[in-house]
Image (spheres, rainbow, N blue to C red):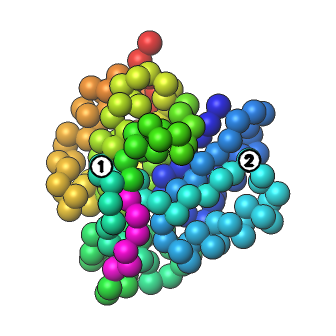
Amino acid sequence: MTLNIRGAGFGLYALFASARLHAGSVLAFEPEPRIRELLSTNIGLNNAGNITVSPIALGDRDGEVGLFASDSPNVGTSALVRRTDYPVQDLSTSVRMLRGDSLLARGEAPAPAVLKIDVEGAEALVLAGLADTLQSGRVRMICCEVHPRLLPLYGSPADQFESFLTSLGFSIMLRHHRGTEYHLLCTRTP
């Protein structure tokens, strides 16, 4: 089994998944260099040899995008849009963005069984870039932090996010609200 973590941050969920996998691997995507360095350090400190880190931002297209990094490397608020709800740097840094389907088609990543997504409002873009993979039925579970206030900044209506997931064949098993965002646990509908 492969677990893909989008917006891996410093590795809290990647390390948790790594320790519980009996077979398989974790592919963690973290485009922000300072946070990716913390992630790599944490992987080494925990001897988590089944985690691979990719510097790519996943989204709905292939190309270069600007990433507005968090003012603090210990806060996972970096985003592809200029946020006003958390302190981010004034200038963006260019990072590579790829569709998840592109990575899989080129053999650069294994097909995931589970996805964990925390991308500060770009959730719908990540799912759109994985549309073929999600429709194939290979992904059995999605854990996603949803940012209703930030989704519209990416052109994604917040009120349509959950219906998009269900249209892809997923059932929402759990919804947990936390401040201005909420977490979803979705499983493939049999």
Q: Quadrant of the C terminus?
A: top left
Q: Which of marks 1 and 2 precedes in the sequence?
A: 2
Judged left or right of residue 4, residue 50 is right
Q: Is 58 on the left-hand or right-hand side of 116? A: left
Q: Which quadrant of the figure has residue 82?
A: bottom left
Q: What separation in Å lies between label 2 and label 1 (alpha carbons)? A: 27 Å
Q: Which residues are magenta?
A: 92-97
- Rendered location of residue 15, percent (x, y): 69, 53
What is the magenta segment's predominant secondary structure?
strand
Q: Residue at x 52, y 56 (%)?
A: 29
Q: Amino acid at mark 2?
A: Asn
**Does 42 sit above or below residue 145?**
below
According to the image, label 1 marks what residue? 60
Using the image as rendered, state which of residue 29 and residue 77 is in the foreground.
29
Q: Residue at x 53, y 34 (%)?
A: 111
Q: Mark 2 near mark 1, Cβ–Cβ under 8 Å?
A: no
Front residue of 135 and 141: 135
Q: Is residue 167 visible?
A: yes
Label 1 Cα neighbours within 10 Å, binned few <14 / some 14-19 / many ≥20? many
Name, please, the residue furthest toward the bottom. Answer: 90
Q: Quadrant of the N terminus?
A: top right
Query: Which numbered marker is on residue 50?
Result: 2
Q: Nearer the viewer, residue 46 or 28?
A: 28
Residue 136 found in image quarter = top left
Q: Does the magenta portion include 35? A: no
* Residue 143 visible in rendering: no
Instruction: Give percent across and percent down for residue 117.
Output: 45, 48
